[in-house]
Amino acid sequence: MTTPPEECRVPEIGSEAPDFELAGHPGQRRRLSELRGAPVLLAFHPSHWDPSWAECVRMYNRMLDFPAICLDTGPIARRYGVADGAAVFVIDGAGRVSWRHTVGVAPPSPNEVAEALSACLPTSVGADSGGWSRRHFVATVVAATLAIALTRRVARAEPITRPRAATTVGSGEAVKLRVNGRELSLDLEPRVTLLDALREYAGITGPKKGCDHGQCGACTVHVNGRRILSCLTFAVMQQGKEITTIEGLAASAGASGDALHPMQQAFIDHDGFQCGYCTSGQIMSAAAMVREAWGPADDDVREAMSGNICRCGAYPGIVAAIQTVRKNPATAQRGQR
Amino acid sequence: MKPFDYTAPASLDEATRAGARPATRFIAGGTTLVDLMKLEVETPEHLIDLNPLGDRDPSLGSVSELPNGGLRIGALARMSDVAWTAPVKERYPVLSQALLAAASGQIRNMASMAGNLLQRTRCPYFRDTATPCNKRDPGSGCSAMQGFNRSHAILGTSELCIATHPSDPAVALVALAANVRVRGPGAQPSAERTMPIASLHLLPGSHPERETVLSPGEVITAIELPPLPFARRSLYLKVRDRSSYAFALASTAVALDIANDTIRDARVAFGGIATKPWRATAAERALIGKRATAAAFRAAADAALRGAVSHRDNAFKVELAKRTLVRALTEVSA
Amino acid sequence: MSDAAKVSGNAAAPSVGTPLNRVDGRLKVTGGAKYAAEFALPNVAHAVIVTSTIAKGRVRRVDTAAAERAPGVLAVLTPQNAPRLPQPQAGSGGGPVMRVPTILQDDAVHYNGQPIGVVIADTLEHATAAANLVKAEYAEERPELDIKTAPHAPSEATHPVGNSRRHSQRGDTAKGLAEAEVKVEHTYTTPFENHNPMEPHNTQAVWDGDKLTLYDSTQGIFSVRSSVARSFGIPPENVRVVSYFTGGGFGSKGGPWSHVYLAAMAAKHVSRPVRLVLTRRQMFGPSGGRAHTSQQLTLGAKKDGSLTVVRHLTTATTSTLEDFLESSGMLTRMLYESPNIETNHELVRMNVGSPTFMRAPGESTGSFALESAMDELAVALGMDPVELRLKNYAEKDPESDKPWSSKSLRECYRVGAERFGWSKRSAKPRSMTDGRWLVGHGMATATYPARQTPASCVARILPDGKALVRAGSQEIGCGTYTIMAQVAADALGLPVERVRFELGDTDMPPTPPSVGSMTASSTGPAVNAAAVAARQKLVQMAIADAASPLHGAREDDVRAADGKLTLGSDPSKGETFAAVIARNGGRPVEARVDLKPTPDQQQYSMHSFGAVFTEVRVDRDLGLIRVPRVVAAYGGGKILNVKTATSQMMGGIVWGVSQALLEETHIDRRSGRYVNSDLAEYHVPVNADIGSIDVTFVPEDDAHINPIGAKGVGEIPIVGVAASIANAVYHATGKRIRDLPITLDKLLA
């Protein structure tokens, strides 16, 4: 199969999904188009390693009744306009792209994928056990090679439902949040904090819950460019503002593709983390702190960053990373993968 | 957290009227309220967001000059913004330092000046609904007096409550004799009033649940700093168990007017040791007219802590508070 | 293993030892690393634990009516209605001490804050609000909360690691005391502490028939699997535990606590996946902590400093649920040479949460007492503290008389002292000042056992010339993903960028939990062995292949480096791994190893050693204590990655500063309620508390610990730091503080 030399654009919803051949088990060469008649989940695994992708695809396969094809990025991904990031496409029974997820660091939640797949079913069939055919399918996860194994799996009996926030006093309205440049419309009660809105409702898990009471800094995000604690504010109060989480930090600074923000690269180089749980809060805090009126000394950085607790004790590396960025803005701007 | 309904009124008028209802709270930065709501220490049924009012009327969130040479700080101004503002840093350094000694960078970006004045005690028994607390649940008893009370107050206590007021900026403002502008529901002239900050907070006395003189529906709209030229020679000293991001074991705000080696005027206030931000007029009187010497500082400190009442774990605060004051006066007069 | 096999594949340019950036760094700095609660399980329900408000007694009744009626609530489980588990007490804490979780199987209350119920609802908000509506009635008894009066655990409580006895005796204590010309005897106390990793304990549980998958924040996926399987009466193969990243553990996540079982129980009850995350408050009590100790330390010496007697008597607290011993005296048995060494441990049972392993359990508390006492002895003798240590240097293990597998302690003292500038110290207290600061210099010895335990690993060379290596280990921040990739890369002969190491799934070969500083020294050798075995298979494949340039070569003449096999005797002859595989079936070349320590290790006593030097500054009036400088040197065997290992040491030293100056869990002496159960009042260091930390690894070859010579260094860096700080505080102020933490009020007096 020859590879078109130029990069292709991401297929539009409703357009035909680019066909390709799958080299799998000996004697089992399949083309995507041969799978028409039922929806197909096509996932492109980012070349940057992430063990959770494998687990997510495993989860999709446990709950879904349709083949899940997981491929490393390469020639086929490029035909789908996917250069090096993560992407998931749902292709309906007629071979058309009906849903896609091509932004963000994290794979889409199984619920989202299930809903997208359910939408591909013929309207006469509801999302209940009777409508789903009892086919065996298991798709195995492919780490580094282009391969696919289609085997059979037991269909799920229970329908997948997304938990909905029940309506209580003053709740049930759509809260519109602009996060990392995307508009999110979430069904939230007023008592949902910005942190929980991000983690539990929007699937954005970069900001972490360390204490939930504004005492550790792990939940630090930017709102209109300022560092704040997302656990100490309600999502409903943050409408109409620009919210940036760690996932969107690099892009917010103009980095393209999946280049890192200079602060992210500096943390890697100076080993400014160990377990990683406080890290997104540290980096968001650091990236904002360099724009605040702090003095140039290490002690100034220490004081400025004292709202971010690191139990692993990576403080010396954190200070070194921040000072590197502060002192070398030119080299820092380049950023690296 | 209990559910509540949330509104963002379009005017101060609407806000104050709505705020006068029972089971209602105003929210600005949220750094105290959201924390306490999660603990169910605060359980409002209605939450009124004051922040959009600041968008409509920028004076509510900014620092501006007063005709008399003082400074006006809008109630919704963020702690970090005020701390870094040039006129505050230059003319009232004690306030800038107190602000920067408080909390963390992120919290200072969120927290409003007025909200900081109204924050509630850090007493662990107040914050734990499973333990008796006269402030949170009047009549239920005080768990701190016979319990763990290392952080608790030695000044301004009563038989019912020894909880410390935790604010740092309030201590500086009390030393500067700031005024607080308050607006209540209704359009009548009496709906607006100004009071010295020293009158804002109440001693626990026999009603520790009442912490300020504010009535339901009243909001602080501004903090006014009177002109005080000698406040250029002021500082805030905070002593705590770790280098940052911790409440004061003892803190002090001082300002000295020194001419010809003699103290012409003085301002002294304490934090971390009292049930409300503590203006130490006895210390001020002991300093005025004296030479700026260690002995005078120590005498002032003794005067300030006269009548301190300590408990099992906080007795050290008496001596610590004195030494903190002596150190602050030494540094500010250098 | 043959000599040929032992030789590193990448001998010319090994990855091991280089400061390679963490391979999981990109994931961690982009928010891409998924922790247990972050897997978006379909249809997940949220569970919140309800805890007791008394410390001792029984739950008479739990009123759940309001909670059950609350919006979104699916179920409320209490001792009244919780399903009875076949073997609820089957939890394992490692060794003979069994962890006893509180999982609603009876109505007993053992401590204030104990789980007594769980609410399951459709959203986190609904579950949290409903949990506050659950009200319990108790039959309350007076709790045991005083170490001086609490009852002693009568049975022989064994040391949690191995089977050491509570009492040890070398020689004759009375004789040693009689021979002493100088004596010091004092009591040292350390407080209750709590681990407080940044990631609170949390678990997601999902059942599929009688198969259970747990996404858990843990240091021990196999411990979780075996404990949960046993408790639920299902075969271990039916339980899969997944943990790719754990946000800190420090000993609190070595095995499952109550919340893990409760998550599984809740998921089964509502037939939905359940996500259960402990609140920060619930990190005080229900998930372990460090025992409170009172230690009496007696040292007797001749005037020349040689120890005639060492006696270390410890009283440590435990809960009424289990007899876990904080074994403070263990290091005293082996650290210094003396003809008469006695240690004893008493255990008292109190109505507090169960203690558990907490970074350097035993050594961190015991070293505070021992190394403070050594300093007090040095003062009494008028002797330099380092000289006193050297005078009593143990050339072999005084407890077992075995030779050390390796010991570089003399070099550590020398390097540490030199880098610190120890010679500039004037011995007299309060003799060094800097304005309002009193300056003090103090030092201490550090030590921690090194051990290799059984571990398995599978290594696979892939057709494209890359490699995938798997072992069911954990990544808690020690850099496991990284160092194992480095070890494997060198053993395979591949650049480290082409090697991926995977962990965190009980479907993978078993390895020990990430505790006891033994991952590098147990899983590391297994990774090495599996990679070597896979490489050997590939080599044999090439040798047997008539079409290969290596056909017919001797195995020990084939070199593997950079993804190529070449002849040592003729480097122009060779081919890539991929070429070999392509011609021979095109399938991955795989080897699995189940590695055990060799019997000859028993002949040696295996420990890491180090020396730590600190400078403290004490404000002469206010008592504020600052630690601007810590210098430490360690002999930790082969350091696999000097960047991640240095970070480990710095982290442990930060823990030592924390132990010395900040940490103490306060428990109300009347009600047993945890009083400072949050991160505002339980003080761990903030960035501004930490100054300069200078760490050196002295070169050390250990031929006996394991084939890769790695000892494991996660816990030794906390050891001795608190004593060195206390010693420095004494040097600065003339005040000897024997009760941790050293807070300013103790210096004001």
Image: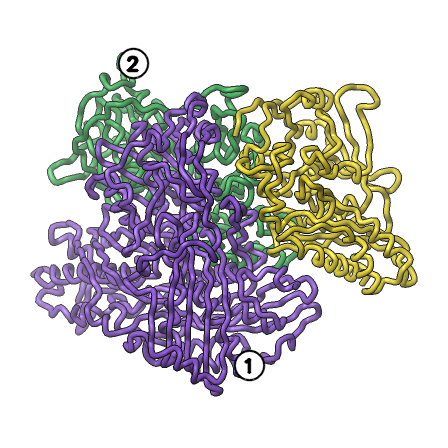
Which disc, if any, is residue C423? 1
Task: Write down the colour of chain C.
Answer: purple
**Which amino acid type corresponds to the residue marked 1 in the rendered image?**
Ser
**Which amino acid type corresponds to the residue marked 2 in the rendered image?**
Thr
Q: Specify the subunit that label 2 lies on.
A: A
Query: Height in image: A155 above or below B167?
Result: above
Name the residue furthest bottom.
Answer: C304
Asked if one can make out residue A249 in the rendered structure from this viewpoint, the answer is no
Q: Quadrant of residue A96?
A: top left
Q: Circle 1 sits in a helix, a strand or a loop, which is it?
A: helix
Task: Write down the colour of chain A.
Answer: green
Query: Relative to B310, is C649 on the left or the right?
Result: left
Query: Relative to B80, is C35 on the left or the right?
Result: left
Chain identifier, colour yellow: B
The residues tagged by marks 2 and 1 sit, at their Cα atoms, a distance apart of: 85 Å
Residue drawn at x 61%, y 44% is B144
Dot 1 crowding, Cα within 10 Å, few <14, some 14–19, many 20+: few
Q: Quadrant of residue C641?
A: bottom left
- Label 2: which residue? A123
Query: Height in image: C251 above or below C133?
Result: below
Asked if one can make out residue A12 in the rendered structure from this viewpoint, the answer is yes
Query: Relative to C432, is C555 on the left or the right?
Result: left
Residue drawn at x 79%, y 39% is B197
Q: Specify the subunit that label 1 lies on.
A: C
Q: Quadrant of residue A26?
A: top left
Residue C139 in the image: x percent, y percent?
43, 36
Residue A67 in the image: x percent, y percent?
23, 30
